[in-house]
Structure formats: C-alpha cells, structure tokens
Image: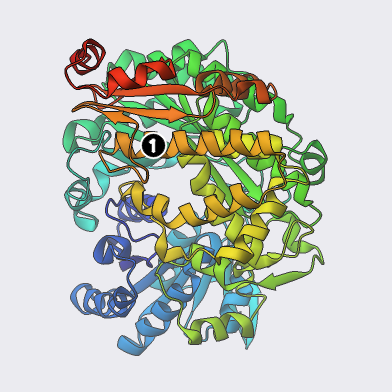
Amino acid sequence: MRVLLLQPPLVPAAEVTPPLGLTTLSSWLRAHGHATRVLDLDLEVRERESAAADRYVPLFERALDDFAPDVCAVTSMYSNSLQAEHLVRAAKRRRPEVVTVAGGAHFGALGPASLRRLPELDFAIQGEGEPALAGLLAALADGGDWKSVPSLCHRENGTVVTNPSREQMDLAALPPMWSSLGDSLDLTRYVKTIQPGSPRRLIYIEAGRGCPFACTFCATAPFWKRQFRVKPARAIVEEMRYLHEEHGYDSFMLVHDLLTVSPKFMAEFCDVLLDARLPVEWMANSRTDIRLKGLLPKMKAAGCWKLFFGIESASERVQKVVDKHLDPKTAETTVVELAEHGISCTCSFVLGQPDERADELSASITLGARLKMLGADIVQFHRLRMWPPAPITTTTVPVDFDLDALRIEYPFVEVPPSHVEAILSDHDFFSGYFVPETLAGTPNQLSQVEMFFHHAVTLAPYTVAALGQLTRGGMVGAFYAALAQVGPLKREELSWDATGDPSTNWRAMRPLFLALLAGADLHEGARRLAQGLFGYEEWRFHFLLGMPTPEPPAAEGGTWSAFLSPLDVPQSIERLRAGEDLTDDLLEPRILVLVRQASGGCASYELDPEDLGELRQPDSELARELSAVH
C-alpha cells in the first residue's frame, strides 16, 4: 500500500532534523513491502511567523495529490495537536477515500478520545506504532479483520473499541533505518538547513525506548510501559557510520528516555564506537544519581560531549512528592565531575508542581544558576503541563488554561482565537494545553518565570545566583513585583532558537532585570553587590558580541575594554561557585579588563583603580601591553 507519513508543524526553525518516529516507521513499512513518503512540515515551513500557519495545509494537500496515498498516518505531540487535527480533516476533504490513522505522543495516549472527537479519523494507535501500523495495512490490503491488530483504536457499530496490546517489540528487529529509507525522505534537504559555521552537524537517532522510573509529571515512561529497551550497540554505531560517511553528520543525539540507566550497555556501546574509530560526538539522557564516574573517561574517549539531566526541583520535599527522589546536592557534584572530564551538560527543571511554594521555586532557580556557573552548558526551566498518560493527569488536581503557557509551546507566534475556543471546548482532548494550579504563583506569573529565568540563567547566572542568595523573602516574589511594574514579557520578543541573536533576549529582558535589582528586598550592601555583578555580566556580554555597552567603558583599546566595578568580581564569583555567602567586605572597587583573543574568547585581568589614568592614555606602557595580548 501507499502510505503518507505526516509530521505537523512542531518547531519551525532554521535548522531541522528528520522526524525520528516517522523515519523509523517508514523504514519498517518499506521492509514490509509498502511504499512510503515522509512529509515533514517543519522542513517545508521553517518559519514561526503567523503567515506561515496558512501555508502548511496547502502543502499537505499538494503532497496528497502528488503521492496519492491509500493511507495517511499523522503523528502529533500535544503542542501541535490542533495542527494535526486540521490535517486529518483536510485529508478527508481532499481525498475522501484515504484511510486516516493517528499516533504519537498525543493520539497514542488519547486514542479513544481522538476517534470520538474526529469523525474524519478512521484509526488511532496507542503506544508502539510499528507492529500496529504494519498489521493494519496488512488487514486493509487483504480486506481482512483489524480486530486482531494490537493497540488499535477503531469504531465498531458506532462504539469506539481498543484492541488489546501485545508484548513490546524487540528493537533488534528494526531494519537499518537511514540506509533503507530510499526515496521516502531526502536527507540532503535536512543537511542543507545546517547553518554555515555551526559547530556541529547534529542529527537525532534512536538508541532505544523506555524509562523504568515513575515520575508523576512524565508522560513518556508510562507510554512505553516503563520497560527499558535498547537497540544493539553495533546497530546504533552503524547508523552513525552511515550518516557520517554519506551525509557528513558528526554529532548525534542518542534518543532514549534514560540511556545511561544500564552502565553495562553504556560500556559496550563505547567499546563498539571506539573500535569503529568514527570522528563523531554524541549526547544522551541520564540522571544525577546514576554514578558514571568510572565510565566517564571511556565515554569521553568514545565521543560523549554532553549529557542531559532532569533535575526538576531543588526541594527535597518536591522531589519526594513527584517520585523523582533525587538529592539536589548531587546535581552540583555531577556537573563538576563532568566538567573535570571535559563533558558538558544540560540541566532541566520543571516548575509549578501543584503544592510547590514560591520559596521552593526560588531555590530551584538559584540552583539552576549555580549549575550554570559550575559548568552546565544549558539550564532550562519548563512549566509543568498536563500531558497524558503522566500519572498526575489521572488525579483531580485543579487546572487552568493560560494563554502564555500555550504560546510558549505553540508552533507559530500567534494563536488564533478559534484555536483557543477549540481548546477550551474540549479540556479532555487538549489537556496538554492546561497547567495545574500551584501555590508558587498564578498561571500567568509561572509562565513569565519560565520565559524570563529560562534565558536569565544563561545570560547572567552570577546575578541570578546572587539575588537567590541575598533577597529577603525570596527572589520569585521580588520578580512578581518587578513584573507588575514593568509589564510581561512576550514570547515573540525572545529568541528561542539556538541560532538566534542572543542580544535580542538581553534587550527584551533588561527592563525586568533592572526592576528586579531595584525592587528586591535587599540591604544596601547586598543591592550594590547584585547590581555590581549585573553590571559586570552586561559589560562582558556586550564586549564578547562586539556591541557597544549600555554605559561607556572606563577605558578601551582596539581589542580590550576596562570596567570600573564597585566590587571584587573574581572573589564574588569564587564564593558563589563555592556556595559561600556574599558579604559587604567584597565591596572594594576594582578595574576589570577583558582582552579579546583570536580564538573568539577573552582573557580577564584585574587592576587597581589607580591604574585607570594610565589605561586612558593610549600610548602608555600598560595600554600597549594589553593591546599586545592575543
């Protein structure tokens, strides 16, 4: 049969990687004798502007006409479920005879509800898609009975029926994915989206499925029945070899909910990759309580450049409530250990648990800033959302709809009023767009926390850490007061794409930073410390980007710039990194000098204030020495 595999717009961006679930399905179905085509509307649209939202349905209709499929199978996350719904309806309008099937995180968790809501949808698959979709196609081709197809939701005499599931598949049975795609997907189009000068040519590949843990907010662990499975190590490495040798990819995100939970597998994978001698890098998901110290040298030698950690909260109480059970202190130890082995990391926090307090939220933000200082490459803050089948979605926790929360996740900049109405009219189907009520703030306030601190910890980690330590009554309450004074951030004001201009975020967030520093409950010395650190970070940020600083530098040369600081910045940073208190004895004026280096970084020097006069003389010995530094 002819099958069109459809990815609705999810994250339109400059650089696009292939939709992993659909490419796996495509190779699986082709191995079973079917003709497939993958239509990735992220690749076709690649823009977030509102006008782009009008283009994806005509693009899909053109593909329907060109490929003339017997079956159209659409995947969906919660954030693009409305777009998926529109495409299913468009398929039946354009080709009434086409069989429509839906799966993925959204439809795969809400199969019966999907069929009840969408008369244009013929089938939904709950959970693992490969055996179910292949079984359905075989039944359709033979005119047979699909009641035996595992995990298939269908209609029977006007009633929605879900077939029993079966044992999950052995991932070793999957064919070599990328080399067997044929003409169903053109990888060269994805390669061409990689921006010139990008440090890595990155692609996602599947390493396995399933996490054995039971965090209350997580939808993926129950989706895969909490069963840990991996592909054979040799199969993963062969995929990496093919993508590197045929398409030039040199960096791989090994997609698995928790790949490092098996140190034995990690050691085997590293051995196979080392034997292959591929000049590639990779990253994977882990937990901070999985002790990898003995494996880290081998992982680094095998190309590991980063690990991803879900920290979630700095509160031990919240850790227990959400069944994560991490000791937040181990996060700092883990980040330092990784840095010692030359491995970076991303640390992620989930904000807005139902009984999370504002002081616990402040502690999480402060910990995030500390992790950034200690070596984390990226620190993320994400608002808790009600994504089935996460255990929290089976509770009676009160929820709210928040337009800001929707717009953060929505594929396009503007959310049409008709889409908001559709969401509000069917809470059960669109539950992923709703957020739980929390003690830490209103829904709008929590969305602002997500937007602001997600970027603030990257731009000014020392300032955030200082505010977290010094603010009486907690940083979050002070942030809410600043928000009321300055007004909310808007999603379109911020760049969420890694290839975007970071100065855009600084300009958007600076008024909130200044209001927070001015209005936080700080004694006078603490305020001067926090404001001094912000001044340093702002000056350094603009200098590294080659941009004019908001305030003129104390002195400058062609490759260097001097900043008159009210405090001992190096000592303040050292104390913050060590977890020690900032005290008024740090308020001693210093001159800091940054010298731009050929590598793109900078060297830092500390001088006495009395040197300022000499610095301001271009022909002075000191100025010439700084200009000679490379």
Q: Residue at x 39, y 13 (%)?
A: 301
Q: Position of residue 380 (x, y in %)?
A: 54, 44
Image quadrant where residue 112 sits = bottom right
Q: How is the image coloured?
A: rainbow
Check the image and report above or below for 377 versus 70: above
Viewer-proximal residue among 422 and 148 = 422
Q: Is residue 213 visible?
A: no
Q: Which residue is mark 1?
A: 539
Check the image and report above or below for 416 versus 554: below
Q: Position of residue 261 (x, y in %)?
A: 61, 28
Q: Residue at x 35, y 14 (%)?
A: 274
Q: Position of residue 172 (x, y in %)?
A: 45, 36
Image quadrant where residue 486 sits = bottom right
The reply, left or right, for residue 493 in relation to residue 379 is left
Q: Secondary structure at mark 1?
A: helix
Question: How busy is the neighbourhood of tag 1: few (under 14 within 10 Å), some, or many (20 plus)?
Answer: many
Quarter occupied by the C terminus = top left
